[in-house]
Image (spheres, rainbow, N blue to C red):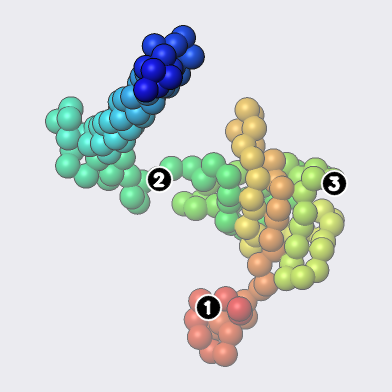
Amino acid sequence: MQRITKFFQSKIFQGIIIGMAIFLAFLVIFKAGMMVGSKKAEFSGNWSENYHLNFAGPKEGFMSGFEGKDFMEANGIFGQIIKVEGSNIVVKGKDDVEKSVIIEDGTTTIKRLKETLKISDLKTNDFIVIIGEPNNAGQMQARLIRVMPSVPQNGPKGGPGLMPY
């Protein structure tokens, strides 16, 4: 009995108790930090989802109502080639807006179905789809040009306006 009493009064036992208390305090502080962080993240997510409601904005959100507006295509063009000049072409796109396209050897891929073409294969009146990047001069730097197959006058198989796919 005296040995047990001496053990409980020893410095080793007191060190173990203090160490366990410090460890328990660290666990409580860590858990409190997790709870605070979780609440902050939840609040931030809910706040951003309801931003328009918090500031009396439109019910549909600030970015609604842009459907059907006439914005220029930033990274893609569909249209008809109206001029070919060296490594530049001019395409008549939506609403007859002319757009200048730069074609670079080595970085621009030109395709018609599975066939790879060269710049010299592009002709006026070809319908093309262009994917690229706009530059500071308002031109499109083409990365991919897809030449659309020509459609017979009355359409494929007698159906007007259908593309042969």
Characterize the local packing of mark 2: few (<14), some (14-19) or many (20 or more) Cα atoms within 10 angstroms. few
Seen at 44% across and 11% down, the residue is: 10
Label 3: which secondary element: loop
Disc 2: which residue: 70
Residue 34 lies in what quarter of the image?
top left
SS type, badge 1: loop
Name the image quarter holding the N terminus. Answer: top left
Tell me the residue that label 1 is attached to: 162
Q: Which mark is residue 54?
A: none
Whichever of callouts 2 and 3 sits on the residue coming sooner in the sequence is 2
**Residue marked by disc 3:** 106
Query: Which residue corresponds to the image point at 66% horizontal and 73% vertical from the top-left?
Result: 150
Q: How many neighbours does mark 1 have within 10 angstroms: few (below 14), some (14-19), or many (20 or more)?
A: few
Task: Report, in whole angstroms, how far the alpha carbon at label 2 lies from the one at label 1.
Answer: 25 Å
Residue nearer the viewer, 65 or 43: 43
Is 120 left or right of 147, judged from the image as shown? right
In the orientation shown, which residue stands out farthest toward the bottom?
A: 157
Q: Pinpoint residue 88: horizontal percent, then vertical percent.
A: 75, 43
Query: Looking at the image, which residue is at 33% across and 50% down?
Result: 67
